[in-house]
């Protein structure tokens, strides 16, 4: 977990000095496995968070003797302290869940502008976060496949918004035809009236197809970078045609 995320989720800036120290020690334990803490270490944790450096003597007294007592001196050592077991267990019970987050995706507009395109539909947001995270972490095949999926979803949403999605329904009438069929229809559809960016539709589709289905192909950064400008233009247009712009 990033320290900034921990500060935000625990509202650390609003807490007392002793409470800050307790939670920072817990953070340090969760990240490193170290269960004993020196005052220089605690002071350094304060600095890393942008907090004022505490008075070490006063803070140690408050942590081990005051009303906010949460630590005891380490056995045989006066230079380090460690959690009182009951305090540690209660802190673990309350905050350990922060390390079990299986929902949050770390991303920051690495490929797709989140400020512009996020916030319309939750499932689209999740795809965009995954694309940006994959790109930022050199997982270019993952990014390519997800970009293909986002492209397909936006095409379907555009048809739905125009009330013409029957044109791309499969033989059952419940699902949709394959993406190549949707693209062929979209490029010539006189109701959607896609701009010249439609000439790139097959490229978006094929980049994702190669990463998903070609057993010897692996995408590289250049493969994504080569299409990202046109991909953004496509997003702008399909967001509009899907009724997702404000």
Image (cartoon, grey):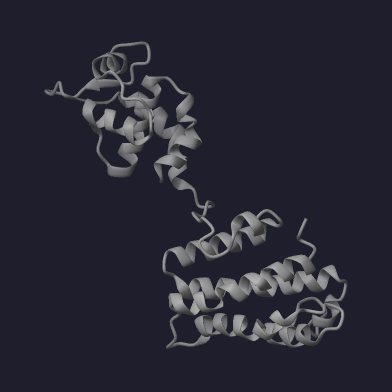
Compared across the picture, whether 175 is left or right of 27 comes to right
Q: Which of the 4 image quadrants contains residue 200? A: bottom right
Q: Quick check: 154 left or right of 35?
A: right
Closer to the camera in the image, 136 or 101: 136
The relative height of residue 188 versus residue 103 in the rendered view (above or below) is below
Q: Residue at x 70, y 67 (%)?
A: 236
**223 with respect to 79 (left or right):** right
Q: Is residue 209 visible?
A: yes
Give the percent coordinates (x, y) of residue 220.
43, 78
* Left or right: 243 in relation to 199: right
In front: 25, or 195? Answer: 195
Instruction: Examine the rendered structure and indicate whether residue 188 appears above or below residue 243.
Output: below
Would residue 38 be visible to someone looking at this image?
A: no
Q: Residue at x 48, y 66 (%)?
A: 134
To which quarter of the image does residue 25 belong? top left
Q: Residue 59's x, y, as percent?
A: 29, 17
Image position, residue 214 (x, y; %): 49, 87
Say which of 194 and 162 sits in front.
194
Q: Quadrant of the C terminus?
A: bottom right
Relative to 159, does residue 181 appear above or below in the rendering? Answer: below
Q: Position of residue 209 (x, y in %)?
A: 56, 83
Residue plotted at (42% across, 19% down): 16
Instruction: Give the tally of numbered discs.
Output: 0
Residue occupying the point 35% across, 26% down: 22
């Amino acid at each position: 977990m990033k320290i900034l995320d921990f500060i935000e989720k625990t509202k650390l800036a609003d807490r007392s000095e002793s409470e800050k120290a307790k939670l920072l020690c817990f953070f340090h334990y969760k990240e490193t496995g170290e269960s004993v803490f020196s005052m220089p270490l605690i002071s350094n944790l304060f600095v890393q968070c942008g907090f004022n450096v505490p008075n070490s003597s006063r803070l140690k007294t408050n942590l081990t003797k005051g009303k906010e007592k949460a630590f005891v001196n380490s056995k045989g050592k006066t230079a380090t302290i460690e959690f009182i077991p009951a305090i540690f267990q209660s802190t673990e019970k309350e905050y350990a869940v922060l390390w079990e987050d299986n929902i949050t995706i770390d991303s920051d507009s690495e490929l797709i502008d989140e400020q512009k395109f996020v916030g319309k539909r939750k499932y689209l947001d999740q795809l965009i976060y995954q694309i940006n995270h994959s790109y930022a972490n050199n997982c270019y095949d993952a990014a390519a496949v997800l970009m293909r999926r986002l492209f397909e979803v936006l095409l379907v949403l555009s048809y739905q918004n125009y009330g013409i999605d029957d044109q791309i329904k499969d033989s059952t009438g419940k699902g949709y035809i394959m993406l190549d069929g949707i693209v062929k229809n979209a490029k010539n559809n006189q109701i959607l009236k896609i701009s010249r960016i439609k000439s790139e539709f097959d490229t978006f589709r094929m980049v994702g197809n190669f990463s998903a289905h070609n057993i010897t192909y692996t995408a590289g950064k250049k493969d994504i970078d080569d299409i990202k400008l046109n991909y953004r233009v496509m997003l702008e247009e399909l967001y509009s045609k899907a009724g997702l712009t404000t």
